[in-house]
Amino acid sequence: MSRTFTIGIVGARGYVGVELIKLIAGHPSLSLAFVGSRELDGRAVAEIVPEYTGPARYATLDPAAVAAQAVDVLLLALPNGMAAAYVAALDAAGSTALIVDVSADYRFDDEWFYGLPELQRANYRGQRKISNPGCYATAMQLAIAPMTELLARPAQCFGVSGYSGAGTTPSDENDPDKLRDNLMPYSLVGHLHEREVTRHLGHPVEFMPHVAPHFRGITMTVNLHLKMKMWQGEVLERYHARYDGERLIRIVDAAPWVSKIAGRHGVEVGGFALAPDNRRLVVVATLDNLLKGAATQAMQNINIGLGLPEFAAIPEF
């Protein structure tokens, strides 16, 4: 008989928290033990997430209360800068729980495994602390990785996200009225994901993020300057060789549309346009920022950390 693992979530009010609960509800080996949310304290989880039919209720839980829960997995879905107190409380309690942090807090910490499975799973050595990559950073790395060693200059990345990527706290970046008929650029140099990708891909990137009026989904257009001339067939061969065995990555000929990726769990990579000199390549990647950019990837990391099939509870792509 297979074992059932208990999982707790802290910070489950936001969009990503809801998507995580949906995935947990369909997982054959996970049981939701608690859900921490100050704003939804006392409300039934099933009231907010109908896909979940269990008894759990949202509760206000400080770090000490979370550390006392003794779950197998703790999933931190908090805003950036808030995870450390919970991690410290679990460490002080001697917890052996698998911790998966969806925020950016530990993406630059060598003591944490950086969990982009398609590029990093071979490096997993049983670490109990996993940092989930950023949504933009996932799209950039998957678009660039097959070409990294052939790049002559920093990769230039023009990213456009739906406004759910700005979270639920009101701001210009998630205000539908301000975004209507608009494309809003922000953090055009030195963005966190620019530094994240440069670190983990081992090659510099220049990232220009924008937010658009649609709710979910990222389009990442990547401009790559090559060390040598390449032809279409050679480029496609590299991408197919890297990703054909990956269940959540699909290589397509034309540039993929963000409208076709919303609500889906994988990534489409396509376009593959070469300049006339055959030394400049443009690649486009699309993904759902709430799913493969966050919740789906977290579920992959949970499954890997627990020794379960990596794609358990993740729908076919």
Image (cartoon, rainbow, N blue to C red):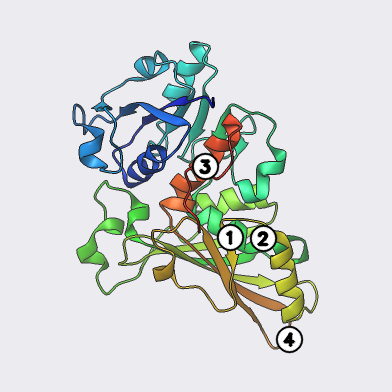
Q: CA distance from mark 2 to mark 4?
A: 26 Å
Residue 295 on image: x %, y %? 44, 45
Query: In the rendered image, is residue 147 in sight?
Result: no
**Residue sitting nearer the eye, 140 or 23:** 23
Residue flagged by tag 3: what amino acid is it?
A: Ala
Q: How many marks?
A: 4
- Contact between marks 2 and 1 (CB within 8 A): the answer is yes
Q: Which residue is mark 2?
A: 243
Q: Which residue is mark 4?
A: 277
- Tell me the SS state at disc 1: strand
Q: CA distance from mark 3 to mark 2?
A: 20 Å
Image point (26%, 53%), residue name: 171
**Residue sitting nearer the eye, 86 or 183:** 86
Which dot, 3 or 4, sits closer to the camera?
Answer: 3
Q: Which residue is mark 3?
A: 312
Q: CA distance from mark 4 to mark 1?
A: 29 Å
Q: Which residue is mark 1?
A: 249
Mark 3 or mark 2: whose residue is earlier in sequence: 2
Image point (40%, 60%), residue name: 186
Quadrant placement of the N terminus: top right
- Contact between marks 3 and 2 (CB within 8 A): the answer is no
Which dot, 3 or 1, sits closer to the camera?
Answer: 3
